[in-house]
Amino acid sequence: MEFSVLITVYKKEIPENLRKSILSCYQQTIKPKEIILICDGELTAALNAEINLLKKEIPVLLVYQLPENLGSGPTSRFGVKKCQTELIARMDSDDYCIATRFEKQLKVFEENPNLIMVGSNILEKNTEFTALKKVPETTEEIRRYSKMRNPFNNPSSMMKKEYILKSGNYREFRYLEDYDLTMRLLHDNPTKDFYNIQEPLVVMQTNDSSYLRRGGLLYVKTDFILQLDFFRRGDIHLFEFLRNVFIRNVIRLLPNQFRKWIYKRKLREEV
């Protein structure tokens, strides 16, 4: 089965992280047909230089430049349309995969043609600790878990392009565009299967700014609008909507160090 890897990058990315991310997608036991890199607005000279080097080293790397910064949702939407294969694997520009990631995901798709999305657990790693972020395994567990939190780790996901487009593709929900798409895929395809491999196939490199991005008034507002959209569509009930808005947004408004502690101690398993 042929597949594409879709990565978006913007000017604040560290060139060394981008290199590690892209190389990890190419140096796989099963290589992608194409790696689509979407540059979200003008990049730094250092990033452009790194990308030019990578283009010479990786023949399947295709780079597209957007004239202005649009954010992850619209940039991902553009990228999906550029992918030429049935399957699209997502990857973040500052994370990296283990070498057998795509081989293991393709095997799951081959064993069950009814699947439209396959993800995995991930490791979150920084200078202080390494934590395992687990996600539910089976379709039933994923649907149940989705009513509270995103049941997929976005940089580990592999999806069928046909169903991404049928569900309306990515939309502009800053920081939450992957959760939004996942819920629409679940809602629009009640007879289809979803699956998470129960081992970490992606390493997410985190720091204090990673937790800072998960909080603040803008995040609270976006999350409220998204939860309201879930409720209006019937994905969650009124009680679930009120519960989610309260619990999720209390965490969003906590000081960064408290939010970091909650993610580390309550929402992750230290390894």
Image (spheres, rainbow, N blue to C red):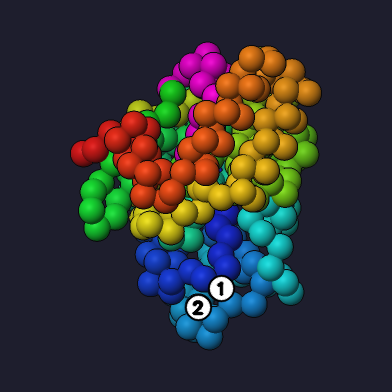
The local secondary structure at tag 1 comes to loop
Q: Tell me if 129 is positioned left or right of 247 in this view.
A: left
Q: Tell me if 103 is positioned left or right of 174 in this view.
A: left
**Residue bearing the label numbered 1:** 11
Is 133 situated above or below 85? Answer: above
N-terminal of the two: label 2 or label 1? 1
The local secondary structure at tag 2 comes to helix
Q: Position of residue 90 (x, y in %)?
A: 54, 48
Please report the residue visible at 57 percent of the width from the left and 54 percent of the height from the top.
Answer: 6
**Cβ atoms under marks 2 and 1 closer than 8 Å:** yes
User: Which sits in the foreground, 98 or 95?
Assistant: 95
- Residue 161 visible to an observer of this rendering: no
Q: Tell me if 24 is positioned left or right of 175 in this view.
A: left
* Type of amino acid under label 2: Leu
Instruction: Give the quarter of the image for residue 132.
Output: top left
Distance from the alpha carbon under mark 2 to that under mark 1: 7 Å
Instruction: Give the quarter of the image for residue 134.
Output: top left
**If the image is split into quadrants, where does the N terminus sit?**
top right
Q: Position of residue 5 (x, y in %)?
A: 54, 53
Please state the extent of the stretch shown in magenta in the rendering.
137-154
Please report the residue visible at 68 percent of the width from the left and 15 percent of the height from the top.
Answer: 237
Residue 92 lies within the magenta run: no
> In the image, which is nearer the foreground, mark 2 or mark 1?
1
Please report the residue visible at 73 percent of the width from the left and 23 percent of the height from the top.
Answer: 231
- Residue 9 visible to an observer of this rendering: yes
Please report the residue visible at 64 percent of the width from the left and 22 percent of the height from the top.
Answer: 242
Mark 2 surroundings within 10 Å by alpha-carbon count, few (fewer than 14), some (14 through 19), many (20 or more)? many
**Residue bearing the label numbered 2:** 47
